[in-house]
Structure formats: structure tokens, C-alpha cells
Amino acid sequence: MIGALLLFATVALGLGALAGRWSSRPWLLLTLAATAALAAAGLAVGTGLAPDWDWRSAFTLGGQPLHLRLDGLSALFLVLLAGVGAAGTAYAFAYPIHTHSSDHGAPARGRFWWNGLLFHLGFVLVNANGLHFLIGWELFTVCAYFLIVLDRRKWAVRQAGWLYLAASHAGTVALFAFFALLASATGSWDLGPLRTRTELAPLFWLALFGFGLKAGLFPLHVWLPSAHANAPGHVSALLSGVAIKMGVYGLLRFSGWLPVPASAGWVVLGLGALGTFAGIVFALVQTDLKRLLAYCSVENIGIILIGLGAALLAPLTADGAWGRLALAGALLHTWNHGFAKALLFLGAGAVAHATGTREMTRLGGLWRGMPVTTLTFLVGAASMAGLPPLAGFAGEWLIYLGLFEAVVGHGPAGWAAGPAVMALALAGALALATFIKAGGLVFLGTPRSPAVAGARDPGGWMRGPLIALAVLVMLLGLVPFAAAPLLARAAGAWRPLAEGVTASAPPLATLARFHLLLAAVLLAGGVVLWRRTRAQGVTLGPTWDCGYAQPSRRMHYTAGGFSGTIGGWFTWFLRPARSLRRPHGPFPDRAFTREDPRETVLEDLVRPTGAGVLRISTAVRRLQHGRLQSYILYILIGVGALGLIVLFHGGRS
Amino acid sequence: MNTSGLNLLIGLAMGLNLLALGSGRVSSLIRAVSFQGMALGAMPFLLSHEFSPWVTLVAIATMVGKGWVIPLLLGRAMRAAHIEREIDPLIGFVPSLLLGAGGTIAAIALARSLPLRPEHAGTLLVPGAVASILTGFILLIGRNKALSQVCGYLILENGIYLFGLLLIHATPLLVEAGILLDVTVGVFVIGIIVDRIQRAFDTLDTRKLTVLRE
């Protein structure tokens, strides 16, 4: 049954990719059918309706027999892929890429690569052969690259695409080493549980680099902001919602199947806490709406890794149940962040398309013209900020619970859990500020330009995914225990354990009661407010204007001004670009101050390192000059060195 | 085995190495190579204990090939290609000579530290071979004209030939014949290449041939 569903999805995606070259409607139907099949397969395995699916074929690809398996962990990510994929497909159907770039082939290309990306993401998820995993991994990277540079006539887009491709390849190098060493140690490319082979533990560091880079783990996130900001809305949604989660999947998969070094939990927890904090601080000071969302993804990957790190630490302590709780939180947060962030990117794409800009300082007052986008975006933003009763809070709450238990249980893990809780709480507060900034500057207030004032909600095919995802985010918040069986199966697939598998269900049921109560209270409050405004009528007037007779839209908060105070605390870390011209003389003419966020890690760490490597290699390249005499000298030196080695060490070899 | 006669010839070859390094004209360089080839060709007579027609044949062939045919070919190439008679060195003559002399001393020191068979320990075969190889390398590295480099290559081959003489008792003279063939082919090929380069680029100065490095 599972096999048939996956086969159907494969065929539908392939046919859709072909049909999409000419026409969009058959492509839409086929791709939606494929995502439905993927969701059905994932849900069937995830909820336990169907047993784990394991399929070996005699058919070989690259000399290796095909080996597919779908277990609880894969199923969880497969459902995420299907959900975000379906929403993105419907959105892409109506998203007019070519209106901005006059590139009429772009939509057809986009449909082709979109199906390619969906297929290879799914292929990686159900794969149990190292070689095929690598092939799928590389192909999904390439598909994503072509989707990022869909609007290829813009220089910034090509630059972002190049950075993405270069960074991804750096990660793939580590994964090549990882899989090749694994295969040479075990004698087979076949993947599966190998927890007893303790000599394989150091391979985890390679996996952490390779998968961490794809996940956007701080400080390996350098490719992420520009790629997410410059891709079309649905592509950013799939990248942020699913593609970077593939890094998380890889880390979960191989930390579950292979033994890990003793320090792995500490490192993952530490990197997670660092990423959570750094990601949200960078997100707060961004002025580009999609960059803000991208940095927020860095933060959420950090949160997920805190959960994973706690799960890796827990077996070191006597009572390891709290690790399971944190892991369930990480898994739930993977879903929540995937759906909510997809919703936000789709909303941001709609805003960018309607207004032609992503600069928050130029937007404002969109709630009048785009009520659906505004409402759904605010639902996503509230969820991302971790506000109950929405989905974002549920996952974080499980992680909190796990970490609290670790703190209460004392021991060395408690020392790690304490700072992690603090980082999580600090990041939660900053996330709230970030999304107040994003929501407030973009949607509230008055429009700052005629183009923004004339912006309208997008058409039905773009509104539909927004509404569907917003409903899903609310449902996941109100009835989070619905996800508990999937979490339990996924945690069981991660590392089989007899007890504590369903640890997440009771806390989630408690949380659901609280969330439902809160939702009822909020709803009642909303109804009361609405009735009173209806009864008394609303008079529109200016807000308190600080004594200015004519408040203009130039007095709005700018994006930099809104986050200026909090951003100022972290200047040492953010290192923004500042330019200042002071007023001079009794009649000053022009004066301004400007502060722009920079890609600090990229510009201050990666670029200088790269420049150093380039200098060294340029110097080495001078050896290749074409003068025969020197080449002969090289040979002489080489032979002489070999002779000396043989002369002095030959007898001992 | 006539050790003193052999050592005399090898000493002569080593002296010719220095002469080759110090000569400022292409023709004298070719002459040095020619004399060295003849000295080397005579060595199998001194090394073998009894008369053998095969050894005699190879020795005569070596003397004729190294001492007469190859220098003749080089001389013809020099005239045909209108090469300037003056050598334009990359490493000057005095530094070349110093390097060559240092190399010769180092070769003798090296030969002392090598575990040689007793019958070879008394001869200059190994130091001569190493010194010739080093001289060949110095000529290859330190000269700009392709023809001088061919001479360096020939001296290098002579060094390898000297090493080959160590094995004269263990292996048939086929080895020497093979080396001889090797040299002939090498010179043949280089002669053709020199001719082609001369026609295509109108120069034999290897400094001007660096555009082909990619």
C-alpha cells in the first residue's frame, strides 16, 4: 500500500514536471495529487496504521541496489514535505514570476524544478542507501538552486544563488566524506541501525558539519538569509519549511542510527543555544522582511537543536526520560516551524508581489488592502513568537519541560540545561519583539507610498494556501496531542526504547486544555469588543501626535528605528554598518544617520578566510609558470627528497 | 677488471662534465658530450674479463652513436636552425661550475655512504654516475636554448648508463643496448621537436615558450 502510494507520487511528480513545461493546470492537479499521496503514506506510517515500510529492489542505481524505507521519523518529515509542498504548489500556480522580470520562460522552468525538488526531498527521506542518499541530496540542492535563481535577471538573485550553491557544496564535501568513511568501515553503503559500532562515533562531527550547514546552524547559516530573501515566495517557503529541515532530519537520522561521541550532546546543545540567540538578534535588526524571516529560521533551527542536544545528553544521566520529552518537543517544533514559516514566507511573498518591495520601512498600512494576508501573517507571526494558544508554543513548551526536569534532576546535564533554558527564554522575548516589528511595520499604520496604498490581496489560489496553513497552525496549537502518536513513532524510530515512548502525550493533553480555554477566553473577549464597537460606533481620529499639528508618514518608525534600542545592546555582536553626517553651523543643511544590518558572519569571518585561502593558492599557482627549467628543478628536488627519505628512513619502513 | 683504467675514464668523464658546464659555445658543449660518449663507450672493454663479440659490438656501437652520430646530428641541427653559437645561460658559468663541483664532491661523499658491493667500492662508477646526472640536471635547468638542454639530457643519460655498467655482470648487455636505444630515440624525438618549434615559433628560446603552460 505504502509502496503503491509512493510510486503513484513519483509518477505524478514526473508527469507533472513534463506537463508543467507547457501548461500549468495539469501540473497543478498532478502535483497536488502527488503531495496528497505523500501525505497519506506519511500519515499511515506515522500514526501506526501501517507498519514501517522497507523495500529492497534488485534494480541497481550507480551499482547499488535500491533500498527504500519509511519509518516514523521519515514519515514525520514526509508529512511536513507534503503539507508545505501542497501549499507551495497552489501558491506557485498563481504566483506571477514573470511580471517582475519579463522572463516568460520562468514559470515553466519553475514548475519543472519545483517537482524535481519535491521528488528529491522525498527520495532523500525514504532512502536507506548511502550512495543514493548522496545523489538525492545533491540533486535536491541543484533543484533548489535553480528555483532560487528563477528570477535570474537580477544580480542579487544570482549572487544569492551562487552563495547557496557554494555553501551547499562545502557541506556536501563533508557528507561525501561521512558516507564514504561509513561505507568503508561497514563494508556496505546500506544504512541502518549500527549503534554497537562505537568506533564510528567520530563520524558524527562530519555529519554535524554537513547537515548543520544545510540546516542553517549558526555560524554555518551564511548562505541562508540571501537565498531565502531572493527566492520567490513559495520557494522560500519550501526552503525554510522543509529543505533546511533536511539537515535536521540527517542529524536525527544518523545520531539515532550511529553511535555518537560523548561530547556530541554538549556541542549540539551549545550550538543550538548559540544559534537560537544569535539568529533572533540578527532577525530583530533586519530591515528586509524576508531576511528577517530567514534569520528567524536560524533561531528556530537552534531551538530544534537544543531539543536534540538534550536528547543526546539524557542517556548520560540516570533518569533519561526528560531527553525523550525534549526530543518530542524538537520534532513537534520541526512541524510547527515548518508550517508557520511556510505561511509567513507565502505571506511575505504576497506582500512583496503586491507592493514590489521587501523593505519594511517602505511598507505599512497593508491591513486595509490585504486583510487576508494580514490576518494569516499575524497568526503565523504569533506562532513563531511562541505565543499560546498557537502551534509555536507547543513544541517549545515540551523542550522547556524536558530542560526543567534536567535542571531539577541536577547532575552535569542540569548545568547545560539551565543556560539553554535562559537562551530559549531570551530568544522567546526577542522573537516577540521581532514579530511585533514585522507585523506592525508592514501591516499596521498608514501606507508610506502610493504603490503600497494600492496593494490588494492576491487571488484565490494564493489566498487558499495562506488560509489553510493558518488554520493548520491554529489546529496544531489547539489540539497538539493529535500529533503525539506521530511524535512517539518518530522518537521510537530515532532510537528504539521500551519505556517513555509516549512521554509527550500527557503534557500535550494538558497543554491542549489550557490552549482551548485561552482560545475561548480570547474569542469571548473579541466578541465582546466587537459588539461594543458595533453598539457605540467608532470615530476615527489622529493618535496622540506629540504636539505636531500634521503627523506625516515620514514620522513612522523606520525598521532600524524600531529595533534601535534592543539592537544597540548587541552592537558588539551585530557590528552594523553606520554612516553619520552631523549638522554643522548655525544653519545646517543636510544631516543624516543611517544604520544597516550586515551579514556579519559572512563578511567578517567567511570572506576574510576565503580571501586568505585565495591568496595562498594564488601564491602556490606561481609555481605553474611554464618555464621548463624550473619544472626540471621541481623534479630534481622531488627526486632528491625521495632519495633523502629512503636514505634516512628506508631501513625502518 | 681494469680498475685504474676504468677510474681514469670515469675521471675523464667527470672532467668533461665540468667542461660542459663551463663552455660558452654550443659547439664546444657538443664536443664535450661527444668525448664523454666515447669514453663511456670504451668502458665495457675494461669491465669484461674475456673477449666477447657481443660486448665489442655494443661498445663500438655506443662509441659510434654517442661519440659521432649524435654530435653530428646536433651539429647539423645547430646549423640548420641557425642557432647562435653563444650560449645564453640562465645560471651563469661560474655558478654552474661551482654547483657542478659541489655536486661531484657530494656524489663522492654519497657513494661512500651507500652500501656497495666490494668490487664496486674501489671504482668511481657510482660517484661518476651521480655527478653526471647532477651535471645533466644543472644543464637542463640552467640553460635557455633547447640545444644546450639536449646536451644536458645526453649527459644525464650518460650518468644513467654509468649506473647500468654496475649491472654488467648480473644482466646481459641488453640493458646497455636498451639504454643506447633510449638515447637515440630521445635525441631523435628532440631533434624533430626542435625542428618543429623552430618552424612554428621562429625561436628555440624556451623562455618564449611559456604561453603553452595551461
Image (cartoon, coloured by chain):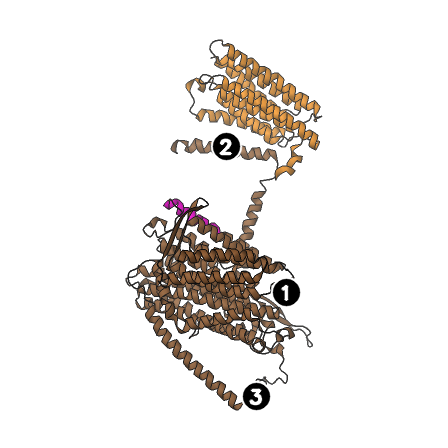
* Sequence-earlier tag: 3 or 2: 3
Q: What residue appears at the point 63 percent right and 65 percent down from the top-left corner? A: A99
What chain is tagged by disc 3? A
Q: Which residue is mark 1?
A: A99
As drawn, is B176 to the left or to the right of A99?
left
Identify which residue is drawn at 33% across, 52% down.
Answer: A195
Would residue A185 be counted in the magenta stretch?
yes
Q: Is residue A304 inside the magenta stretch? A: no
Q: Colour of chain B?
A: orange
For residue A630, which quarter of the picture? top right
Element type at marker 1?
Answer: helix
Residue A609 x %, y %? 53, 53
On screen, residue A427 above or below B35: below
Residue matched to label 2: A640
Q: Residue B193: name its quadrant.
A: top right
Asked if residue A430 shows in the view, the reply is no
| Amino acid type shown at disc 1 | Thr
Give the magenta part as a residue range: A172-186
Mark nearest the camera among 3 and 2 is: 3
Q: Identify the residue position indicated by label 3 in the image.
A: A539
